[in-house]
Amino acid sequence: MATSSMMSSIPTITSINLRRRNRSTGLSLSCSHQEASSLGVQLTEGEGKLPKVLLKSAHGCEAEIYLFGGCVTSWKAAGGKDLLFVRPDSPFNGQKPISGGIPHCFPQFGPGPMQQHGFARNMNWSIVDFDNVEGNPVITLELRDGPYSRSMWDFSFQALYTVKLNPKSLSTALIIKNTDTKPLSFTTALHTYFSGSVTGASVKGLKGCKTLNKDPDPTNPVEGMEDRDVITFPGFVDCVYLEAPNELQLNNGLGDIITIKSSNWSDCVLWNPHLRMEHCYRDFVCVENAKIGKVELEPEQSWVAEQHLSIS
Ligand SMILES: O=P(O)(O)OC[C@H]1O[C@@H](O)[C@H](O)[C@@H](O)[C@@H]1O
């Protein structure tokens, strides 16, 4: 099992001992890469030689997850195109965060005292469990504190991130546990980049929400109220929606309607950089499940939030 969670010690593929839960006994068993592959979970080398997990379902769906950042970078429903987007300029160097897919923002959504979006997206996560449930692969990654995180946020914590691929959906569950002896607090988000045509993309379900518009000044957002049934991306968009409903619809402008269900992700952020990223802004929109208000955890307490992306 990879135990590293520091930037300076990236796990190599051969050092990673995949473990699979024995469903009848609850024990964890070591498992060879071949066995893992037959379970629809395969560890490979991705871009920049970074360890990448492939999930393949019996139904022909696929997903990819980089251990660096615990970042899902690809989700394809059976025979379909990639529903997620990775920016063409994204680094894959194990130092800077992967810009695309579903990066984590933790323990700070930002802006704030720490680096933008925290540190979880540029640390190495470990594989702690994987399984296959009726042809649907599921994997759990773990992130723990280390010197790098402690340099910014001096707390002991455990993050567990479970990703499950179903025939027409990709589900994630994030559990944050306070393993320290003192209380901690954090903000967080799943910064999901969806493939899309920005001129045709739209989001439904946010009408009536209180908004914090980060345009023009992210450090001093303007409060408002969303009055549109259908929100489009005609220019630069960077807006927080507070107390968002737990079900939204994204029309990606490419012929797909993606339902975004969530539990305990109380807020939502829409973002498109427009001309600030002229080379790629036309090809994606970000719809981010977020927790903008601080989550406060006493020692041993946990917080859990789920996201369920599905296409019809
Ligand atoms: O380029 P980054 O660090 O991934 O952040 C991109 C954007 O992410 C969004 O979530 C924020 O609301 C924006 O303010 C920010 O610019």
Image (cartoon, rainbow, N blue to C red):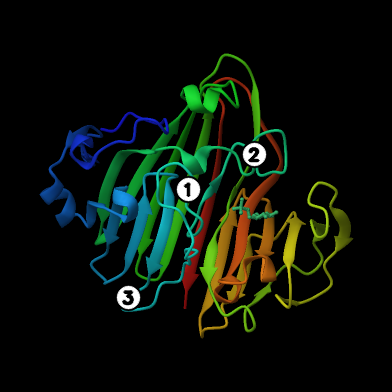
In-image side of 75 versus 185 (left or right): left
Q: Is residue 249 above or below residue 166?
A: below
- Residue 119, given in percent of the width and then of the height, sits at 54, 37
Residue identified by numbered label 2: 108
Give the residue type that dot 2 points to. Answer: Gln
- Residue 153, given in percent of the width and then of the height, sits at 60, 25
| Whole-number angstrom distance, CA of label 1 to CA of label 3 | 22 Å
Residue identified by numbered label 1: 173
Q: Which residue is depicted at the point 25% across and 52% down?
A: 45
- Residue 282, given in percent of the width and then of the height, sits at 59, 76
| Whole-number angstrom distance, CA of label 1 to CA of label 2 | 18 Å
Using the rendered image of the protein, determine whether residue 21 is visible from the camera's viewpoint.
Answer: no
Q: Which residue is depicted at the point 55% across and 75% down?
A: 283
Rendered-image quadrant of the N terminus:
top left
Residue 78: mark: 3
User: Ligand 1: does it lie within 8 Å of the C-beta at label 3?
Assistant: no
In-image side of 31 versus 138 (left or right): left
Mark 2 Cα-neighbour bin, 10 Å: few <14, some 14–19, many ≥20: many
Give the residue type that dot 1 points to. Answer: Ala
Marks 3 and 2 close (CB-CB < 8 Å): no
Give the residue type that dot 3 points to. Answer: Ala
Label 2's element? loop
Q: Nearer the viewer, residue 155 or 199?
A: 199
Q: Is residue 214 above or below residue 51?
A: below
Q: Which residue is depicted at the point 57% across and 55% down?
A: 191
Q: Is residue 162 above or below residue 171?
A: above
Label 1's element? strand
